[in-house]
Amino acid sequence: MKKQIAILGSTGSIGTQALQVIKEHADLYEVYCLTANNRVKELAAQARQFNPAAVVIANEEKYDELKGLLADLPDIKVYAGKKALDEIVEAAPIDMVLTAMVGFAGLSPTIHAIKAHKKICLANKETLVVAGELICRLAAEYHAPVIPVDSEHSAIFQCLAGEGGNTIEKLLLTASGGPFRNFTKEQLATVTKADALKHPTWNMGAKITIDSATMMNKGFEVIEAKWLFGVPADRIQVLVHPQSIVHSAVQFGDGAVKAQLGVPDMRLPIQYAFTYPDRLHMNGERLDLFRQPLEFFEPDMDKFRCLALAFESIRKGGNMPCIINAANEIVNRGFLEDRCSFLQMGDIIEKTMQRVAFSTNTDYDTYVATDAEARRVAEELMKIKN
């Protein structure tokens, strides 16, 4: 029987590429559910193409519009709201859930999917950034496998295949460096959102592209790696690798280093998460190592303060990663809306980390309260900046 897949965030970059993978392997996979936050027309078009059992629009105000667009397809159930997202992932026919939603909003449905014993294909990095300890505990309790979809974590996951309990000495997490890798701090003071959205190697959504430009994205990936692979942050090294060919590597106790290489194409880690431990054919460009050199540089923690702040949040633990994530979501949107400058993002995040109440509790209610408080503080600080 075909594996039934729920895609949370189907209209985003990861979601649309996942649908390409499913289409290429229609004999093995079928879409059970598609969800989006606001993109009603795109969601309706996907529903017409893939004919899922259900669609969910998170923004309840868009329900009538979506219902109208799919009125001639009565077999597709239409739901709306955050509660509907939590409930749909528990549906019995679903085999795996691709969590490709952006931000804190992905946490609750991921928890519900884990408790329903679903296989989690994790592309929502904020889930582990905010609540890594809780997610790992629940995944073990409910025997729900969590397979990483981020290219870097998928690379590490692939490098660890067949290694059993062999000692991991270091994780080598690669980063493109974003569009501002060679900028000075003075130049960074005047960059615009248009500049920041021109990523040199990856085609991603606006939020993650800005996070890549500040290197906060890489800081979040360090936190993810800590929880996914049980390796402390001081044994995770970030390498700036502009070509984005080496997606990450593992250094073992005997000094050997295994790396996973490939062209920058997110379909590969998405497909691997679906098919693990098998590999299926995938159409597309193949890596040609004669065409370009492979370069590696140490990241500038002073210039890219967001990366340094992420490491600081890991060392502090507790709800501090939740604080930094919430503040980052606020300033990221603020930068895209021209309400703060590129360098002000780091300033606001740091001050939010200092002002929001720190807690060592790692339960869901603490994360929800922390997220709300951090967002409020970051918004206030952004208004002061202006």
Image (cartoon, helix red, strand yellow):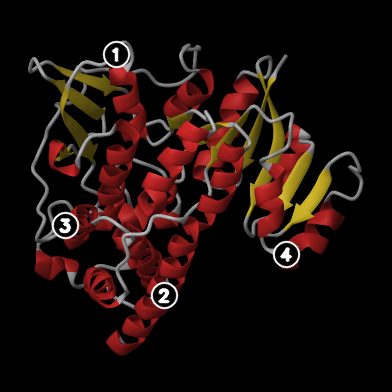
Q: Residue at x 50, y 44 (%)?
A: 13
Which amino acid lies under the numbered mark 3 shown in the image of this protein?
Ala
Q: Position of residue 218 (x, y in %)?
A: 26, 47
Q: Residue at x 74, y 29 (%)?
A: 93
Question: Residue beneath label 3, please?
Answer: 308
Q: Residue at x 24, y 67 (%)?
A: 191
Q: Position of residue 362 (x, y in %)?
A: 39, 55
Secondary element at image label 4:
helix
2 or 4: tag closer to the N-terminus: 4
Q: Height in image: 216 above or below 352?
A: above
Q: Position of residue 181 (x, y in %)?
A: 16, 51
Question: Residue beneath label 4, please?
Answer: 60
**Quadrant of residue 243 in the image?**
top left
Q: Nearer the viewer, mark 1 or mark 3?
A: 1
Question: Residue beneath label 2, please?
Answer: 373
* Residue 164 as seen in the image, left or right of residue 98: left
**Quadrant of residue 97 in the image?**
top right
